[in-house]
Amino acid sequence: MHNHYTGAFRTFASIVNTRITCLPQVHVAGSRFPTVPAAAVASPLAPLIHRWHRIRTMASSAAAASKRLEGKTIVITGASSGIGRSTAFEFARTAPQNLKLVLTARRVDALRQIAADITKEVGDGVKVLPVQLDVSNPEAVRGFVSGLPEEFRDIDVLVNNAGLVKGVAQAPNIAEEDMDVMFQTNVTGVINMTQAVLAIFKQRPEGGAGDIINVGSIAGRDPYAGGSIYCATKAAVRSFSESLRKELIATRIRVIEIDPGQVETEFSVVRFYGDKSKADAVYAGCEPLTPDDIAEVIVFAASRRQNVVIADTLIFPSHQAGAGVLHRKST
Ligand SMILES: NC(=O)c1ccc[n+]([C@@H]2O[C@H](COP(=O)([O-])OP(=O)(O)OC[C@H]3O[C@@H](n4cnc5c(N)ncnc54)[C@H](OP(=O)(O)O)[C@@H]3O)[C@@H](O)[C@H]2O)c1
C-alpha cells in the first residue's frame, strides 16, 4: 500500500534521480530543501529538481507520520458521519500497513459500510472494527473496553469526536430534552470515554502514554445567541482538556484539543431536527470547511513525535473570524 505522496514522488524520482545523485551537493540558505546539487542550481532542470526535493521532503515527512502511527489502536467516537468518518479514512490512508481502528457511533450499519470502504481502499493492513456505542449512556461506555476483542483493547489514541447541537432556542425556552442530550453527549460522554481509556494509558511506562484528542469548537471560545447550551458544552470540553493536561503533566499522555469553525457535515441537519433546507441556509454564500480538512489536522496532531503536543488548534475557513463573524458572498 502507499501513502499520499509516494506515487508522485516515484514519478519525479524516476525522471531526475540519476542526474541528481551524481552531482555535488550544496546547501541553499533559507531553503526548505536540505541540499540542492551545485550544478543543478543553474541548470535548465532546476525547477524540476527543486520540485523533486520538495516532494522528497513531503514524502519523508509523510513516511515519518506513517511510521509513528504504525501498530497503533485508534478509537474514534461519532465515526458514522462528518469529521469522525473522515478521520477514520485519514488515519487509514496515513498508516495503511499496520493500524487498528475502532469506529463507534449509534448507527452501526453506517460504520460497517465505512469499514468495508476503508478495507477496499487501503487493503487489510488496517483492521477496522465497527462498534455500536451511545456515548451518552454511561453504562454502555463502562462496558465498552471490556467488550472489545482482546486484540483491540490496547488503545493508543482516543478521538472524542461524537457531539451534537439541538435547536436554536434561547432561555427561558430551551427544551429540557435538548439540554440533556447535548450535555450527556458532548460533556459526560467525553469525560466517561476519557476515563475508560485513561485506565489503559496509565498502565504504560513513564506514568502512562497515549493520546486523548477532544473535538471542541469555536463555540467553546466565542459563545453566541441561540447556542447557549451547545457553547456551554464545548466550553466544558475545553476546561476539561486543559485541567486534564495539567493533571497528566508527569506522564507521556498527550491531551490535544481540536476546535473547528464552520464545517459542512450532518451537524446542522441534526440541529434543525432533520430540516435540510434550514441546514443548507446556514452555509448559504459561505465556503465552509470540509470534514477532511479537520481530519487532516487530527491525524497530523496524532502523528507528531511523542514529545510534541499540539495542545490547541482553532481552524476556520477563510471567510470566518469568529462564531458569528462570517463573510457571505451575495448570491
Ligand atoms: N460541523 C461543524 O460546523 C462543527 C464545528 C465545530 C465543532 N464540531 C464538532 O465536531 C464533532 C463532529 O461533528 P460533525 O460536524 O462531524 O457532525 P455529524 O456529521 O453530525 O457527526 C456527528 C457524529 O456524532 C455521532 N453521535 C451523535 N450522538 C452520539 C451519541 N450519543 N453516541 C455516539 N455517537 C454520537 C453521530 O453518529 P450517530 O448518529 O450514528 O450516533 C455522528 O457520527 C462534534 O463534536 C461537533 O460538535 C462541528
Image (cartoon, rainbow, N blue to C red):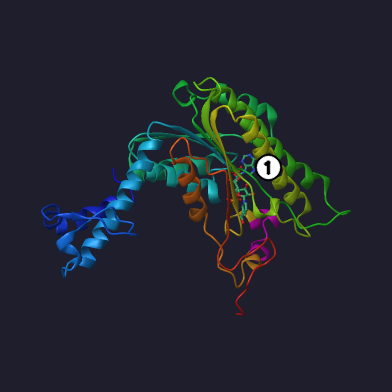
Label 1: state its secondary structure: helix
Q: Quadrant of the N terminus?
A: top left
Residue in view at x 12 percent, y 57 percent: 19
Task: Kindly identify which residue carries mark 1.
Answer: 237
Q: Which residues are magenta?
A: 268-279
Query: Can you say whether 126 is above or below 209 in the image?
Result: below
x and y, in percent, of residue 268 in the image: 65, 57
For the stretch drawn in magenta, the main secondary structure is helix
How many other residues sit within 10 Å of disc 1, few (<14), some (14-19) or many (≥20)? many
Answer whether residue 95 is visible to the viewer in this image.
Answer: no
Answer whether residue 245 is visible to the viewer in this image.
Answer: yes
Identify which residue, 237 or 120, lies in the foreground.
237
- Kind of residue at badge 1: Val
**Does the segment drawn in magenta span residue 53?**
no
Residue in view at x 63 percent, y 64 percent: 321
Q: Is residue 55 toward the left or the right of residue 272 in the image?
A: left
